[in-house]
Amino acid sequence: MQRSFFFIFAFIVIPEFILSEVEVKTGIHFVDKVIKKILPSQEVVMNENLDPTNENFSPEELDVEKKLRPLSFDDFTGQDQVLENLQVFVQAANLRDEALDHTLFHGPPGLGKTTLAHILANELNVGIKITSGPVLDKPGDLAGLLTNLEERDVLFIDEIHRLSPIVEEYLYSAMEDYKIDIMIESGPNARSVQINLNPFTLVGATTRSGLLTAPMRARFGIQSRLQYYNTELLTTIVQRSASILNVAITMEAAIEIAGRSRGTPRIANALLRRVRDFAQIKGNGSIDIKIAKYALEALHVDAFGLDEMDNKILTTIIDKFKGGPVGISTLATAVSESAETIEEVYEPFLIQQGFIMRTPRGREVTELAYKHLGKIKGNIQGGLF
């Protein structure tokens, strides 16, 4: 007796706005698996020259980076309102000989949060200790830093939104009362001992302010958001950095580099260093508009400062999702990148430049994106199903 087996494959098309809620609320990864099967996997790595989170410098580059970093309010370019307020707060704290209120800097990466923490310490004429949220695994790690702070010193915690809950709670009393409780010994002999701390200033930096807990946010007396830079300000930064690096640069070349720097000083300085390399090897050592354009094209940085991954995100939304809307988890799977990286690194600039819109139903591309990619709206190459 022969038996026949029939396999029936059913694809249920879930509306994107429902899909987004499912992804967020339940973390279901079924759709991710479907998309991975259907969409060709072509991994695209972010152009490291355009990565504002890239701090993997060689010792030589680290020295250069330190030289380029402003050391005082007078050296710092941009963020005028933030700077004006900080100058008032610092002058007042110095007059009263008090610790500056705890300060939070938030905004996209590469805009100067770490630099401003160093400037605060310099302007207050105090020491600074530097750490980051992921490094502080347990309260003992934090206690070691806090107990070694001198009066009015600055403790800088980068990525403060990534502090573990237990370390964060431990920090509350230190911020409010300049006191911490530590456990002595263990077992039945364990006892808590309260230690008084020197008054200090906690400076926190985060690219994801929405992930900060309400109690933590409330303990920062000063909160400042850093904004993207315009081309004019970035041109000034490029010229200043070129002067420090002792390399001649024309105004046209400085504007060209600034215009492709994604509104971010860290990227502007990174591109300047790479263009300088091309100028020394392919040119006469000075940077003019011709060598600047040649170098930037060789680095795959287009006129808008978009790299291959930026363009892949836009192309995917247009070609695979009919221009959107599409949920962030679905989009992340389609371009083989984490949702966190898209939200933190790529999306802010794409939104700021007008290539993408956020809607309640997901991400949509704009007319500018179609124009930039040379595509016609409604002329869709393909879809998921």
Image (cartoon, rainbow, N blue to C red):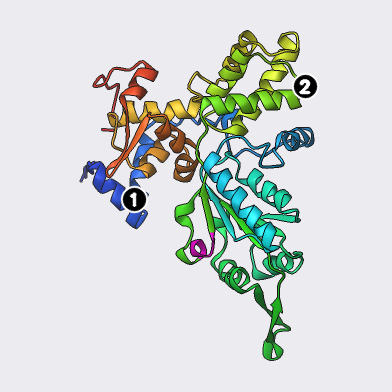
**Residue at horizontal 75 percent and vertical 64 percent from the top:** 149
Q: Is residue 318 left or right of residue 93?
A: left
Between 227 and 266, the residue placed more toward the observer is: 227
The circle drawn on residue 75 is none
Position in image of residue 268 (x %, y %): 61, 28
Position in image of residue 11 (x %, y %): 23, 41
Q: Quadrant of residue 238?
A: top right
Per the model, the C-alpha gap separating discs 2 and 1 is 52 Å
Q: Is residue 41 left or right of residue 327?
A: right
Q: Quadrant of residue 79?
A: top right
Q: Which residues are magenta?
A: 216-221
Q: Quadrant of residue 324?
A: top left
Q: Is residue 290 left or right of residue 283?
A: left
Position in image of residue 216 (x %, y %): 51, 64
Q: Secondary structure at mark 2?
A: loop
Q: Which residue is mark 1?
A: 23
Disc 1 residue type?
Answer: Glu
Q: Which residue is mark 2?
A: 246
Q: Is residue 33 visible?
A: no
**Residue at horizontal 71 percent and vertical 19 percent from the top:** 276
